Image (cartoon, grey):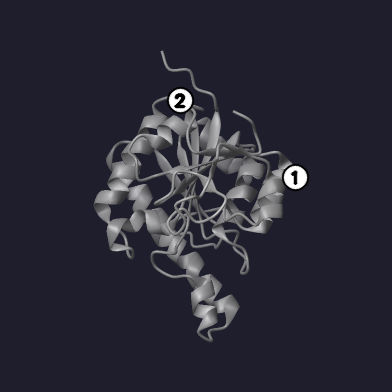
Amino acid sequence: MTVKKYKRVVLKLSGEALAGEQGFGINPEVVESIAKQIKDIYHQGIEVAIVVGGGNIWRGLAGSAKGMDRTTADYMGMLATIMNSLAMQDALEKIEVDTRVQTAIEMRQVAEPYIRRRAVRHLEKSRVVIFAAGTGNPYFSTDTTAALRAAEIEADVILMAKKNTDGVYDCDPNTNANAQKFDTLEYLEVLQRGLAVMDATATSLCMDNKIPLIVFNIDEPGNILKAALGESIGTIVGGRK
């Protein structure tokens, strides 16, 4: 019998994860595959909240680097996360997973406004909650959103699903064959080493609130469930295996 380790998790998905091999846009087959993996967690009785990035559609930093006003570019990125969240909701609802999208930018015709107590209540009623539009503020990444929402809903862990990597390394394993993978790390080590796990704001927020983070490869089917069940996978930050 499977023994679940976590009661409530925040799953952080990059926008690129929804694009698949094409690298941009939304690939319905990939979204469907991820939705089925989320359903596996759902059936374990684990409460699931999701934060999705928007890099497959638009990156605020990229727009800013090309001369666009940073605030405008970041708001466009928030709208991209809403599109991804609705795509994920559609895929989950099609496989009979009750889902709610809550957005930090009010648009009542599309999604509920983010209200912490309502989000917690949805989770308690076994609904998957998708947090869209980041924090609703420019200059903050969706990594920071994941850390903030995890703290607010008192999640047990953040599951950081990454493409093309199975954990955290001391350098880029794609360019250095001698790169060493970490099984465990503390948040202070991540900050001191400048490791590309999540941005410094998100890392500090997790460290201050003692929220562990599991970094794993989303390209391998079944890894989301393994991470949610506390199996030995990827790299765990802020907590020892």
- Number of numbered discs overlaid on the protein picture: 2
- x and y percent of residue 101 in the render? 46, 50
Quick one: 160 or 147, which is closer to the camera? 160
Quick one: 2 or 185, which is closer to the camera? 185
Quadrant in the rendering for residue 14: bottom left
Say which amino acid is labelled 2: Gly
Quadrant that contains the N terminus: top left
Q: Tag 2 or tag 1, which sits nearer the N-term?
A: 2
Q: Is residue 204 left or right of residue 65?
A: right
Does residue 110 show up? no
Check the image and report above or below for 208 versus 57: above
Quadrant that contains the C terminus: top right
Q: Which structural element holds mark 2?
A: loop
Q: Which residue is mark 1?
A: 208
Check the image and report above or below for 31 versus 125: below
- Residue drawn at (31%, 36%) of the image: 96
Label 1 vs label 2, nearer the camera:
1
What is the crowding at mark 1: few (fewer than 14 residues within 10 Å), some, or many (at least 20)?
A: few
- x and y percent of residue 71 in the render? 59, 76
Quick one: 94 or 61, which is closer to the camera? 61
Say which amino acid is labelled 1: Asp
Q: Which residue is mark 2?
A: 45
Does residue 168 show up? yes
- Residue drawn at (53%, 48%) of the image: 169
What is the crowding at mark 2: few (fewer than 14 residues within 10 Å), some, or many (at least 20)?
A: few
Check the image and report above or below for 130 versus 104: above
Q: Which structural element holds mark 1?
A: helix
- Residue drawn at (66%, 44%) of the image: 152
Q: Is residue 116 left or right of residue 59?
A: right
